[in-house]
Amino acid sequence: MRLFHLSRAPHRSLAVASITLAIVVGGPLAALADWVQFQGGGSHDGLSDGPSAPLALAWTNADIKLEGTDTSGGLSSPVVAEDGTIVVVAPTAVLGFDGGDGSPVFSAGRDLGPSSQPAIGRTPEGPIVVFTEGFGNGGPASTGSVTASPSPSAQAGAGGGFDSHMNAVDLATGKPVWGSRVQLQDVVQTPVAVDQTSAYIGDVGGRVTAVDLASGEVRWTKDLGTPIAGAITLDAGLVLATTLGGQQQPSEIVALDAESGDEQWRAAAEDASNLVTAPVVADGRVLTLDALGGVLAFDAGDGRFLWRSEVINPISPRGQPFLLQGVGAPAPVSADGQVFAVDVTGRVYAFEAETGAALWDHALNDPSHFSPPLLTDDHVLVPTDSGTVYAVDRRSGHLVFRVDGGGTFLRGLADAGDLLIAIRGFENAALVAFEADATGRLTDEPSPTTIDIGKLLTGFLLGGVPTGFVVLLLARPLQRRLGPAIVPGSGEESV
Amino acid sequence: MSTRNTRDRRGGRAPVAPPRRGLLSGMSAPPLDSMPRIRTAFTRGLAGTWSSPLVVGSILVWLLTEWLVVVALGYPGPFALLAHVSAPTPLSTFTDLSLSTGMLGVRQGLLFVFATAAVHALWFSVLLGLAIETIESGGATRWGAIRGLRAFSVVLALHVIGVAVVFAAQIVAALGGAGLALIIQMAALVVATWVFAFAPVIAVTERRRLMDCLGRSMRAARMPGSGNLTFAAIYTVSIFATFLAPGLPGVLLDVNPPASAWIYVVLMNLLHAAILGAFTLRYLAVAEEVPDAPVRATPSRERASGARRRR
């Protein structure tokens, strides 16, 4: 009997242990998030395995107070830690929120600066949030003051300057983790990128800086000469940066060795305009966008130019479908042999990744100035300035779903496991979360740029033709009453 | 004719150049009696063109045809761009530029703009011929349209000039800064409309050559007390305002415009047709008073040979 009990006890314990393990480990696994930097990972491909359309608003946290002398920049696009913690950068703070309900988790002070997207990196002591702060020498106002909050860099603002720094805080506590901040020479308006050991930023002066995640020491700096146009991209031991270019310098993608910072290759296209996005790596290609509507692909191994397709949009401002938007960073997304891009007017384009041939486009007619799209298995999800998230079918290019985010300037869609997180508004910033909606129904709307002869003629017959008839009916009596404008034979007008 | 003539030493009659005036000196002059008032001219132009089934029908057919063609060529919208396809240059230049760059992109589109301009010049000539006929005879016939083709070369030249005006205005506006940009652009449009508005009418009614039409149009526009600048300013500024007005129908990327967009576009084109009628009436009313071009002084044979001897 004892033996029997003994023999059964381990089985029960094993079962209990298994269930416990399933609850403890399996639960978080189901909600595992992996969106620790701009567009998810170091390659910035924007690929998400999170929820897709139909979506519904899960929760909103509009109770976020922005402090500082200039709050017009609002919040940065969010990043999501593995444990689901959502992190955003506010003008004078780094804020953490619970991934389940959006409630505040931590707040750490930060020197006033552009709300550039932070990144979450790993150190032996645990995950840390790496962010940039300050405006460099060209601050917003000489009288601006650094927040009085317990910033790890509070003393650095003394002296009246708006220094630019890279800094890091512990994800769990919000406490500073580096002995001193990393001094930068220029302001950073692009997202921070991280790999296993280092954080990388590109500043407006054209310098790429690599910093050790654990110690905060600068590993190397490389001056590329012209402003860095988007987030630094990390792929196969290379650090890729897009330079905006200048009057004398071309706009290029520069590949640096991740260990040493030594230049490996430079890539440019003859007919390209200024490159305005991060170099996105997908399926062995480096993808980027230029200001005049170019979607470009280079070989990720050696930078060889592959193709450039140009999108044409008559309503794009100044004829530029893709714009450099400061911290609002556009970028293409790509997967499964397709490349997608969204222009500032909210027009979605699909291309064949191999050749660059245009596949389809869909005009949402809802501007999307401040954020790249997010790619799920079936849809391209586009956050827009009106606050709506649109889902466009990847294969057909038809609009299949739209959901309102409850406010304007929705941006920075991030995969938080079972939720999609986004930011809306600027000075009245809010954090919003979307979840899969089992009750929602997908639609199938072709792009309004696809001709529908019946619809076109209906508009003409209901609008144009009646207008012509009404005009004739009104003007003919008037003309009869007035008589001819010029008296026949006299050559003079009968006024 | 108001040109005063006198006899030269050889007893022949030589035209005397009109006194030199500043560009805007005519604004302070008393109203020109023979020039119909702006309101009258507009009413006449509106009644004449809008009462003609041929004019109204032509506009409807042209708009539908052009839209189908440009959509087939890849233009994605906005449809509202066609609102000014019947406007005189340089207002219609925006349509030329936007259509060509909207189909081919900025780089190739700028080269294609003259092809678009040629098509629009053809349409404008036809519409102008119809408008002139409604003013002259109270109705329009197909012969009026054919007669309007006389103006094609002049209208095409004006479209080319319009492109230059738009680009020059943008360059000057860029130099002047954001605050002045709008004013500079609008001023350029007003001036170009003012000085060239009569040129196509002259080409049709007087069958003059290109440079003669342009010069005569300028002189007619500058006649003291004519109110031409005021008319051009009211018209151009009103139309320019529609370029900037938010919420107009048909301003989105959509190749299947709704009824509201059609109403807007058809009405705007009818408005331009009425303005063409008004320009026609105002020119025809003063045509015989427009001063001739000043004769260029050319060195006489005697003076030229004397100069050679001195050398």
Image (cartoon, coloured by chain):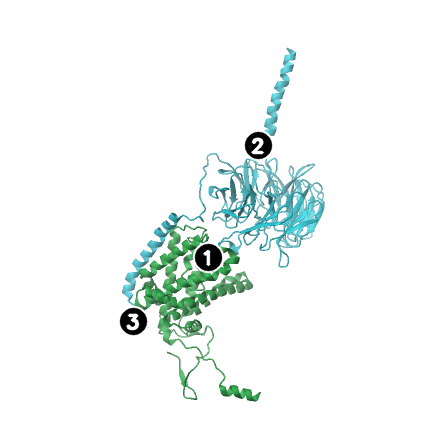
Chain colours: A cyan, B green
Alpha carbon distance from label 3 to label 1 = 41 Å
The three-letter amino acid code for the residue at tag 2 is Ala
Q: Chain of mark 3?
A: A
Q: Is residue A245 above or below residue B12?
A: above
Location of the N terminus of chain A by quadrant is: top right
The image's mark for residue A487 is: 3
Q: Chain of mark 1?
A: B
Can residue A368 be seen?
yes
Which residue lies under the disc numbered 1?
B99
Mark 1 nearby-residue class (10 Å; few <14, some 14–19, many ≥20): many
The image's mark for residue A30 is: 2
The three-letter amino acid code for the residue at tag 1 is Leu
Q: Nearer the viewer, residue B206 or A143?
A: B206
Quadrant housing residue A419: top right
Secondary structure category for the residue under label 1: helix
A266 horizontally vs A415: left or right = right
